Image (cartoon, rainbow, N blue to C red):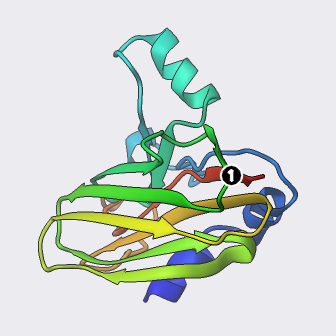
Amino acid sequence: MLDFLNRKVPALFREELDKGRRMGLIGTSDSHRRNPRLCGVITGIYAEELTPEAIMDALKEHRVFATNGSKIVVDSRADGQLSDQVISSSDGSVDLSLSLVGTKPITGVRLIGIGGKTVASFPGNGTKTLTIEKELTKLPKGDHWFYWAIEQEGSSKQYSGNISVAQGNLAWSSPHFVEVK
């Protein structure tokens, strides 16, 4: 199932990251449902406060994550920084961390890097929470990006029309950018 996680993120997105473009992942849909909250996706936002200005700042700074309807909190950091901060590394190392709080047990997580390749995989622990610490070392000089692909228990059912509120099981962090000098 974890292969499905990577296929759901469009190759075009990964290709643009490979070209050096800095972007975040948000949940959007054109499902054309009559009720917008039934659209099938959710965007999580790291806003400093609940104001329109703070939400717009978070969107502009790519402090966001995406789900396919999954209710989950994704806290992803590189060297303690949220996404969209370029992390400089002189020795080719970076500490990546992920903290998850879901509504269903977390079944697996993958760390995705340049070219959409899996850097590391982690099984779930049978609970609705999971914390992962991953140190990457000996990264070659140049620019790198990494994001997390998360799967909760269950499946992503596809309904026609407005039959049900979207209740997916997948989530993705926005990428972290690492520059090795």
**Percent from the top left, x then y, of residue 106?**
24, 73
**Percent from the top left, x then y, of residue 29?**
58, 51
Q: Is residue 39 visible?
A: no
Residue underneath mark 1? 90
For the view shown, which residue lies furthest in the left direction?
A: 127
Please, what secondary structure does the residue beneath circle 1 have? loop
Q: Is 117 in front, or is 168?
A: 117
Q: Is residue 71 left or right of residue 68?
A: left
Above or below 152: residue 43: above
**Percent from the top left, x then y, of residue 175?**
60, 53
Above or below 39: residue 15: below
Q: Is residue 145 left or right of residue 111?
A: right
Residue drawn at x 58%, y 61% is: 93
Residue drawn at x 34%, y 16% is: 50
**Percent from the top left, x then y, of residue 166?**
35, 59
Quadrant in which the N terminus is drawn: bottom left
Residue drawn at x 83%, y 52% is: 20
Q: Is residue 124 left or right of residue 29?
A: left
